[in-house]
Structures are given as C-alpha cells and as structure tokens.
Image (cartoon, rainbow, N blue to C red):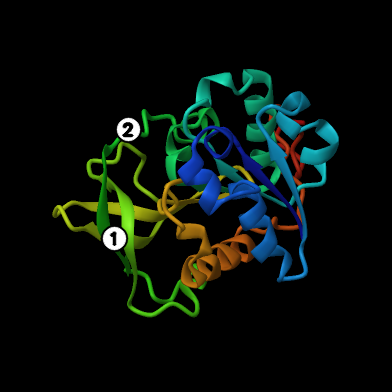
Amino acid sequence: MNITVWNEFRHEQRNDKVKAIYPQGIHAVLASFLQEENHHVTTATLDEAQHGLTDEVLNKTDVLLWWGHIAHDEVDDAIVQKVQQRVLDGMGLIVLHSGHFSKIFKTLMGTSCDLKWREATDKERLWVVDPSHPIAAGIGEYVELENEEMYGEHFDIPAPDELIFVSWFTGGEVFRSGVTYKRGNGKIFYFRPGHETYPTYHNEQIQTILKNAVQWAAPVKRERPVYGNAQPLETLKGE
C-alpha cells in the first residue's frame, strides 16, 4: 500500500524534551515501523507547500495517518476539503491523539470532538473491548503505558461504528480510545495514545495496533456509487 504520514512537526522543533524522543519527528518514527511491513511510506508536514498533501500525493495515498496539536487552525480549508473527498472516495484515515481536534476529524464527525484532558504523567491502561477486531490482533487483554496524557469522557463524537479500545487512567477517568467510522467509501480509525512528550510510538504494542489499523483501513477496490437523477433499470408502467 501507499501510506502517507502527516505530522504538524512543530513540537519537535521547539521543545527539547520532544526532540529527544523524536529527533526526526513523530512522522519519521511512524513511517519507520510501517515500512517494516513492506508498504511504500512517505511523510508530509504542515510547513511544506500545500502541507505536503498535493493532489498527486493524495490521489495515490491508500491510507493517511494524521498527527496534529498546536496548529490545527493553520491547516488550509482547501486541503481539508481535498482530504475529506479522498476519504469519501475510499482512502483510509487514521487520526492520532490530539488529532481529535483537527479540522479534518471534526469535519468528518460533525461534532466538537471535545474532551477532558490532563498532562500529569498518568498511567494509562488501554483495554481491548473488541478482541475479535483485526485492529486488536496480537494484543493481549490490555496495553499498559506507564506515562501518558489523560483524555477523559465525555468525548463529543458520534456513536462509533465500532469500539475497540477503552482507556483507564490513574486519576480514575475512562475514555473511548480506539473507535472506527465509515464515511462514504472510506474507513476511519481514531486512536488516542501518542502525546508528544512520552515515547508512546516507540512501544511495540502500539506499533502493532497501528500496523493492524493500516491493513484494516485499506481502500475497498470499487467506485463510489453514482448519485443524483437516475434512469430506471426496468421499463416503467405507462411508458
């Protein structure tokens, strides 16, 4: 598959703690382990021309991963519309962590996508609540992350098509951390873990989940349905 990893790439350039964990950027780490699956993986970042998401890049992307946080408003609305159209046409989309507030996720969800949060080195226990789902393949009953940012309910999203992971945090909060949706011909997976100041994407179990998610989100090889005024397939009475 052709995979594009999109990253805002701002924290890594401004915050020494983040730079120490992801010296080449979060996108580079995500791309490196996805390449192990023999996918063709490219990266794109906010400050590139057209945010790195040119028509040529989007048209050949099978699955797009999206990580953003402090610069959601800087993403051009025209690019958001193009990504939305590609999802409707069948491109898979995996939205990561604070990407819940990205323009593209909010557009596709139609809600505020707001939540509670706390950055206080909580322990996260990511429970598998749908063990039969292919995204959970190879994962035990839960994944434990010693330090993560807390996200808590209520998470203002539409009722998911599928709920795969639910998180518990040291402070007592819970969160729907792995949910799927279908929009048009495309499939969407939102996955919560991945705060920039913690080495979450170096965790092998998290990597396994994302490798599985890419396979699950792969496009279905069919054209979108034709909409609008339609001619009858059979002869209508009176004609």
Q: What's under tag 2, amino acid-wise? A: Asp
User: Residue at 69% of width from left, 61% of height from top?
Assistant: 32
162 over 13 or under it: above or below:
below
In this orientation, does residue 225 appear?
A: no
Q: Label 2: few (<14), some or many (≥20) within 10 Å?
A: some
In the image, taking residue 183 as reference, residue 31 lies left or right, namely right
Identify the disc placed on residue 220: none
Q: Earlier in the sequence, mark 2 or mark 1?
A: 2
Q: Position of residue 208 (x, y in %)?
A: 54, 70
Q: What's the CA distance linking mark 2 and mark 1? A: 19 Å
Which sits in the foreground, 210 or 18?
18
Q: Secondary structure at mark 1?
A: strand
Q: What's under tag 1, amino acid-wise? A: Glu
213 over 44 or under it: above or below:
below
Q: Position of residue 177 (x, y in %)?
A: 36, 54
User: Residue at 50% of width from left, 32% of height from top?
Assistant: 102
In this orientation, does residue 65 appear?
A: yes
2 or 1: mark nearer the eye: 1
Identify the disc placed on residue 114: 2
Q: Position of residue 67 (x, y in %)?
A: 55, 42
In the rendered view of the protein, which quadrant contains the C terminus? top right
Q: What residue is shown with label 1?
A: 124
